[in-house]
Image (spheres, rainbow, N blue to C red):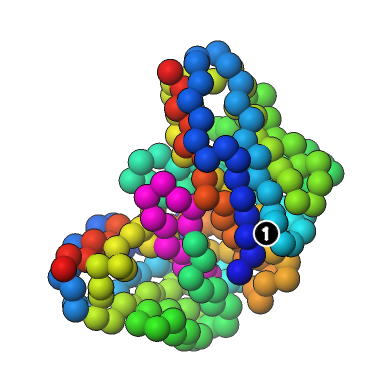
Amino acid sequence: GAVVSQHPSWVICKSGTSVKIECRSLDFQATTMFWYRQFPKQSLMLMATSNEGSKATYEQGVEKDKFLINHASLTLSTLTVTSAHPEDSSFYICSARNYGGRAGNEQFFGPGTRLTVL
Amino acid sequence: TQLLEQSPQFLSIQEGENLTVYCNSSSVFSSLQWYRQEPGEGPVLLVTVVTGGEVKKLKRLTFQFGDARKDSSLHITAAQPGDTGLYLCAGARGGSQGNLIFGKGTKLSVKP
């Protein structure tokens, strides 16, 4: 299957600082990438859809100025959590859409980034 | 709003037992995907079903897509402790965005 990497795998930061998370598709090009947030023992919550070369589409209730998304190339999308606060602590997961898949819209997920804001 | 109801939410069984997880919706999906997630890791794609009535098998796992493409099931035969994890179903919207609608997940625990 298609491989998606995320970096860093975990990060601890002080309140008020900004954190950047990278998502890379390693063996395929991804016009569209997705960013999810997952709280303990819960399912994934879609935050935004990242489109290469255009602005991201944010889900209702997600602050675009707080969660900055950049999709500068077909293999890289970044999520920057600006002025992070303890309530932003969560497991952030990205996925990349592989148009080569049978369904045409299969998503392959990265391993996730555990963010802890002190 | 498309919703995907997944049940049961929790399931604890003994090794060797069979189980079925269900995903139901009132909406039609262009495809449906099943994922398995271990703690602290991202979801891993198990299977994608596309055609109504489709049945796919992956070793002891059997996946079925409803005829109307509104529901799906995952059946595990003779569960093993290694099957323990969070199972997620996700329905794909049609169109260029291809967003996935996730069920709430089924936390499966298989005890030896």
Task: Specify whether B43 is left or right of B16.
Answer: right
Give the residue type at disc 1: Arg
Look at 24% across and 81% down and name the residue there. B78
User: On screen, B79 above or below B3?
Assistant: below
Q: Mark 1, chain letter?
A: A
Instruction: Give, as a single range, the part of the protein colored magenta.
Output: B32-43
* Relative image position of residue B54 (x, y in whole percent): 50, 85
* Relative image position of residue A54 (x, y in whole percent): 82, 42
Residue B30 visible, this angle: yes
What kind of element bears circle 1?
strand
Q: Residues within 10 Å of mark 1 (few under 14, many from 20)?
A: many
Q: Is residue B42 magenta?
A: yes
Residue A49 visible, this angle: no
Q: Name the image quarter holding residue B82.
A: bottom left
Q: Which residue is mark 1?
A: A97
Q: Name the image quarter holding residue B77.
A: bottom left
Look at 78% across and 38% down and name the residue there. A55
